[in-house]
Image (spheres, rainbow, N blue to C red):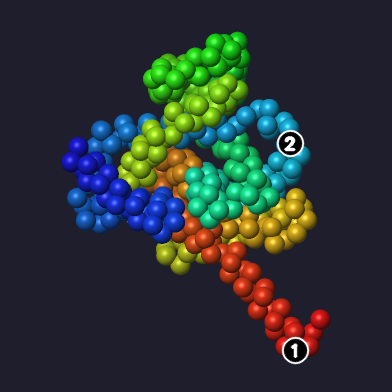
Amino acid sequence: MQGLAVALLVCLALLVLSKRLAFPPIPFYIVAGLVLGELGLGIVAADEISAFLTRIGLLFLLFSMGLQLRPDQIRTRSTSFATAGIIDGAVNIPLGLLGALALGIPFYEAVLIAAAFYISSSAMAVASLIENKKLFLAEAETVVWLMVFEDIILVLFVALFSAQGQGAAYLFARTAAVIAACFFAVRFARKPLISFLSREDELPLVFSFSAVIVTAWLAGMLGVPETLLVIALGSALSQTVPVVLEAQIHPFRDVFLIVFFVFFGISIDFSGIPPLPALAGLAVLALLSKLLSGILIGRIVHRRAVSGVEIWSHTAARGEFSIALAAVFGSAFVSGTVAALVVITSLGGALLGKYGFALFRLRALRNLAESHRLGRP
């Protein structure tokens, strides 16, 4: 309990600092964990309480992600949504896989790193748009839909990794049946649920919290991945009153995620990860791969490459879901490599979100002035 209290106090100070700097706090939390844990001062260690709270934070994060997967909206925006998402995946997943394999990483672990390479930080992308006052841009909508598309692919990754050694076909079939039952139950009870969740007392809050915990328990009873079932519950309930549910979950998610990120940093073991030059090269490749996919999306979806730079500046950071995949399915080697990748790209992404496009415009203006000075049209 003492370690948890110290970690929360440190994170409170870092959260105040991040707000003053208009800088996303996630990198600060991870670095705080590194400093407080065995790799740093050694004053905080993981225990059963922190492990439980970390698990709860992950579940609320996945449920919140599911609330963004609204079937009706996905169908309405299917063309541009699919185009941007396919480009994003077609560029980043192969480059991540090739980069990992080039470092001599075994194929299964390379796939995990490729998944981390591909999945941007939804929390940091949205926070970057809000904090830099760019939600009004056309590119902002594309960024949000990219996060949704990546969330869908994340579900496939979770299913793929969950099926390892368990009979993939049987696990997929059983999971699909349970998810279908979840959607059917919510659809059948949609009107009563809307009425219940629209109440102004504490009952919707208790329902939201209990629904996530009970669903995770049922997943264990039914032998299906709790991550998938919690995501599916969020997506099913998105057809009721998702704004209310998001408001109810938001405080729990934010507080528990602080614990998740800090204790992820505390538990990181950097032993056996690639040498620093190789790791730096992998991080640079991760940043450049998002630049390439961003420019392609900008040219195809928005008809101009400069839009791609704007998209890149908000999607370069990897974060919570990369860490979740590594924590749930990866070895210590994968977790350490992904953690380092997340720290580097999240710091770089936060700077890009705040200053990247301004620097790009400044360079463009300088090039234009130089062209005029030399008498070129």
Q: Residue furthest bottom?
A: 374
Q: Residues within 10 Å of mark 1 (few under 14, many from 20)?
A: few
- The three-letter amino acid code for the residue at tag 2 is Ser
**Residue 112 or 376: which is nearer the viewer?**
376
| Residue that carries the numbered disc 1 in the rendered image | 374
Q: Is residue 258 left or right of residue 116?
A: left
Image location (x, y in percent) of residue 2: 18, 41
**Residue 7 or 324: which is nearer the viewer?**
7
Q: Using the rendered view, name the quadrant where residue 191 is placed.
A: top right
Camera sees residue 313 = yes
Element on which disc 1 rests: loop
Question: Which residue does the image show at 58% across and 58% down from the upper left?
Answer: 313
Query: Can you tell which mark lies on residue 154?
Result: none
Q: Residue furthest right?
A: 377
Q: Residues within 10 Å of mark 2 (few under 14, many from 20)?
A: few
Q: CA distance from mark 2 to mark 1?
A: 47 Å
User: Across the whole image, how many numbered discs are drawn on residues?
Assistant: 2
| Residue that carries the numbered disc 2 in the rendered image | 78
Question: Which residue does the image show at 71% across and 78% down from the upper left?
Answer: 368
Question: Which residue does the image show at 64% across and 69% down from the upper left?
Answer: 361
Q: Quadrant of the C terminus?
A: bottom right
Element on which disc 2 rests: helix
Image location (x, y in percent) of residue 106: 51, 49
**Residue 369 or 303: which is nearer the viewer?**
369
Q: Residue furthest front?
A: 200
Image location (x, y in percent) of residue 185: 57, 12
Question: Which residue does the image show at 74% across and 43% down from the upper left?
Answer: 80
